[in-house]
Amino acid sequence: MPNNVQIRLASRPKGMPTEETFSVVEAQVPTPGPGEVLVKTLYLSVDPYMRGRMSDAKSYVPPFVVGDVLTGGVVGQVVESHNDKFHVGEFVLGELGWQHYNLSSGRLTKLNADLAPLTAYLGVLGMPGMTAYFGLLDIGRPKAGETVVVSGAAGAVGSLVGQIAKLKGCRVVGIAGSDDKNRYLESELGFDATINYKTVDSLRKAVAAACPEGVDVYFDNVGGDITDAVFLHLNDFSRVALCGQIAGYNAEKVEMGPRLLSQLLIHRVLLKGFIVSDYHADYGKAAVEMAGWLKEGKLKYKETIVDGLEHAPQAFLGLFRGDNIGKQLVRVAMPE
């Protein structure tokens, strides 16, 4: 076998990560022992939450260890198995390393490549899809005729949130960082209105214009100035699903913005942060419904795919520049 190329965390970044945050190392391909499976990596998921794991600050998941291989969602193919549950050639999903070959003790999910493309299991039918489904439906509780606002709307999660809200009969407003992304949201995904937060003179006025009857549900992927602007237009008894705060992930100190808790009090707003793994027991039910919508053409998705494991760091950094539309993936190898 060829050498096992790995992407490791070289140092903890201060502020925005750089290419020097990562190191590319060659190691031997591991040999599976009793009960173990050797998995060839096909696709890597690149996600903003990984930035938090590069810091040693306390969070909901343990930090990466400096010098260790980075880990994330991986779709792969079994190439050697000493585990009766898995056979050579099967496709699997797991939390595995950024490397060409991974050893697993069997904590893997088998995938059906005939049901959906393999990449969908890292996107619409994977963690982003579950995040959109539960965050919107369990916390946002959208009702027909309500206005739903989504920040980070052209990303893997936000683009699905908007479409599910449309399926529930809502008016949907997306906030993204380019005119091309907003055209995609309106023309292909059916969003009712969009805001380019990079070009408007006033976010507050832009939200007011796009939401003349106020905001009933806000799905927050971003935080920062965008969330400040949306909070000023929340209706009585509105709901906020706090999913991500990417605007502050690379900040070296907490930025002080307007103190808007009074808005939550005045309008009796429900704000709840959530981690998608909280809903793990219900993934099966959600995946069935999401797959049904996908098969019926009611859900669409877009992927931005970078080729080559060595380009995974650049793909990750691109998340913070807004390079991707939809799900950001790295294609490491083709299926055998």
Image (cartoon, helix red, strand yellow):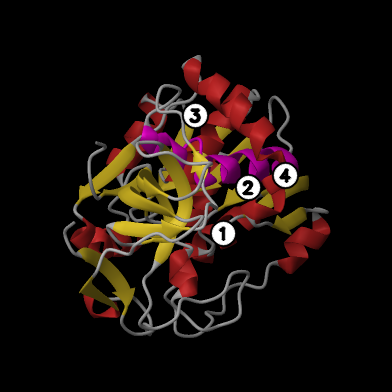
Residue 28 in percent (x, y) is at 24, 69
Q: Could you tell which of marks 3 and 1 lies nearer the N-terminus?
A: 3
Helix, strand or loop at label 2? It is strand
Q: Residues within 10 Å of mark 1 (few under 14, many from 20)?
A: many
Residue under circle 4? 281
Dot 4 amino acid type: Ala
Viewer-closest of 86 and 97: 86
Q: Which residue is mark 3?
A: 192
Find the distance from the CA under tag 2 to the CA under tag 4: 25 Å
- The image quadrant where one finds the N terminus is bottom left
Tag shown at residue 218: 2
Tags 2 and 1 touching, CB below 8 Å: yes
Question: Residue farthest to the left?
Answer: 2
Residue span colored magenta: 118-140
The secondary structure type at the circle numbered 3 is loop
The answer to the question of whether label 4 and label 1 lie on touching residues, with beta carbons closer than 8 A, is no
Give the amino acid at mark 1.
Thr
Q: CA distance from mark 3 to mark 1?
A: 19 Å
**Identity of the amino acid at label 2?**
Tyr
Q: Which residue is mark 1?
A: 227
- Magenta region, main secondary structure: helix
Q: Is residue 46 magenta?
A: no
Marks 2/3: CA–CA distance: 15 Å
Q: Horizontal and vertical percent for residue 305?
A: 26, 44
How many labels sit on residues? Answer: 4
Q: How far is disc 3 from disc 4 in space, using C-alphas?
A: 33 Å
Q: Is residue 131 magenta?
A: yes
Chain-order first, disc 2 or disc 4? 2
C-alpha span from label 2 to label 1: 9 Å
Q: Is residue 267 left or right of residue 223?
A: right
Residue at 19% in and 54% down = 308
Residue 222 showing in the rendered view: yes
